[in-house]
Amino acid sequence: MSRGRFVTFEGGEGTGKSTQVRLLASYLTQCGEDIIQTREPGGSPSAEDIRPLLVTGAADRWSPMAETLLFYAARVEHWREVIDPALARGAHVISDRFADSTMAYQAYAGGLDVKTIEGLHALALPGVEPDLTFVLDLPVDEGLKRAASRRDNETRFERKGREFHERLRRGFLEIAKHASKRCVVIDANQPIERVHAAVLDVLKTRPDFA
Ligand code: TMP
């Protein structure tokens, strides 16, 4: 039995990741693939316990380092409890966010050193990275407008201000440039079905997914 593939969707607020994760998961399930759909922060019982600490409350409730360590505490459990076992049994895993989000939010936008995050990742999850990452790119104003129309209380990062979100968008594009074999940037400023079609077009070019 060969190991499954690990696919992630990344991007700023309101870029439509969750919708695209759902559409891709249902498409591949209909194709007969064994698919696990998951998300961060969360995705496993103990990581979901950590999630509310990170996504609710005052924007400045954590120091940048404490926040980063909480994201990694959740991620290590998510990997150990859900992602790694699924890949090991040959299922494909599609996750709404993974480690690139920490690099973009806590380093590029939040101000922590890129090398600090790289070092933490190497310590916590050595050698772990997705096989393929879709970075959904959208102008900040449009993303924040879409995010504001959702009715939930998970707004801690949405409230961080426009400059934060501009740095975040540039951060994701920078990450995609540095990891250009793994990452594909998709224009998210188009109808949902068009974005989904662009995702499928990319999959068709990857022999290990075809
Ligand atoms: P979500 O809105 O995609 O569910 O993600 C929850 C929030 O957490 C979102 O505002 C992005 C933020 N986040 C980080 O800041 N760092 C991370 O490592 C992850 C996974 C999410």
Image (cartoon, rainbow, N blue to C red):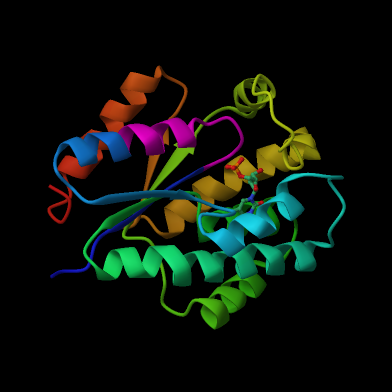
Q: Position of residue 35 (x, y in %)?
A: 28, 49
Q: Is residue 201 magenta?
A: no
**Is residue 93 shown left or right of residue 145?**
left
Question: Which of 36/20 is in front?
Answer: 36
Q: Position of residue 66 (x, y in %)?
A: 78, 67
Above or below for 151 versus 6: above
Which residue occupies 69% across, 38% down? Answer: 165
Rendered-image quadrant of the N terminus: bottom left
Which residue occupies 44% across, 53% down? Answer: 177
- Image quarter of residue 49: bottom right
- Give the mark count: 0
- Image quarter of residue 29: top left
Above or below for 23 versus 80: above
**Is residue 175 shown left or right of residue 113?**
left
- Image quarter of residue 203: top left
Which residue occupies 83% across, 45% down? Answer: 57
Q: Position of residue 116 (x, y in %)?
A: 66, 74
Question: Which of 89/24 is in front?
Answer: 89
Above or below for 28 versus 8: above
Which residue occupies 67% across, 26% down? Answer: 144
**Is residue 197 shown left or right of residue 183?**
left
Q: Position of residue 24 (x, y in %)?
A: 30, 37
Which segment did they paint magenta? 11-24
